Amino acid sequence: MNINIKNFLKVPVNVFLYSKESSEMKHVSILNSREKRSMTFPIPKSFFSSPNNFMYIRFMIGSPPGDFIIFGDYCLSSKKIPENLYIGKIRCEKIFSSSGYVPIIKDMPEIYLNNLTGFDLTFNNNIKILKRSELKYEGFDRTGISNGFILRNNQGIFDDYKITNSLTKIFYGLISDKENC
């Protein structure tokens, strides 16, 4: 059994395999950001020996010998193996308030930026989102966010994201088995 893994980040991702029972982590491959953006990941046959086995695929950014930063983990269960995994997709949500009239200065009064990675992210030189946290962003001088606003990742990990319609949340750092999450 194989899993197809695709990298949507602008940087290479190192792929490791490990289990909680074993402290050993095995380096499997590097998913580059340009030429080799996808790979077929074989699941060891021994993994299916028990119906309750769990194994983790760890995705790390950086380079050997020890400058790796954990991007995230994906837990595999012998009961459910996805066909595909997508690393670094950006997901947006529209959630409308039922609280009645909200005075809007621009197109959106605020947006929640979620960082699901294991490291801090910075956008547009002044928007900092701590690792595994959410930031309420209300625009420059708290005047709201206009359609057309572009979020540029300073670390060069994520593609620029242009807001083209009213959103409530943006998630950075997804590891998902759905391409359009």
Image (tube, grey):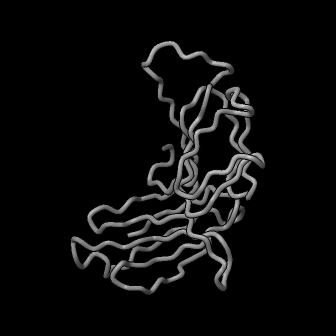
Residue 68: x %, y % from top left: 62, 75
Image vertical order of residue 70 relative to residue 180, above or below: below
Q: Residue at x 70, y 53 (%)?
A: 122
| Residue in front for this viewpoint, 126 or 40 | 126
Q: Residue furthest front?
A: 141
Quarter of image, res 106: top right
Residue in the picture at 24% in, 79% down: 49
Residue 14 located left or right of residue 97: right
Name the residue: 62% across, 51% down.
129
Residue 146: x and y, percent? Answer: 70, 26
Of all residues shown, which one is farthest toward the right?
125
In depth, the one of 169 and 54 nearer the eye is: 169
- For the residue pair 7 and 124, the one nearer the viewer reads as 124
Residue 31 in view here: no
Q: Position of residue 6 (x, y in %)?
A: 56, 59
Vertical order, 160 against 65 (above or below): above
Quadrant (top left/top right/bottom left/bottom right) for the N terminus: bottom left
Q: Left or right of 109: which side holds 73?
A: left
* Residue 55 seen: yes
The correct choice, above or below, for 11 with respect to 174 in the image is: below
> In the image, what residue occupies the spot 36% across and 66% down?
76
What is the x, y in percent for residue 134?
Answer: 54, 47
Q: Report the number of discs.
A: 0
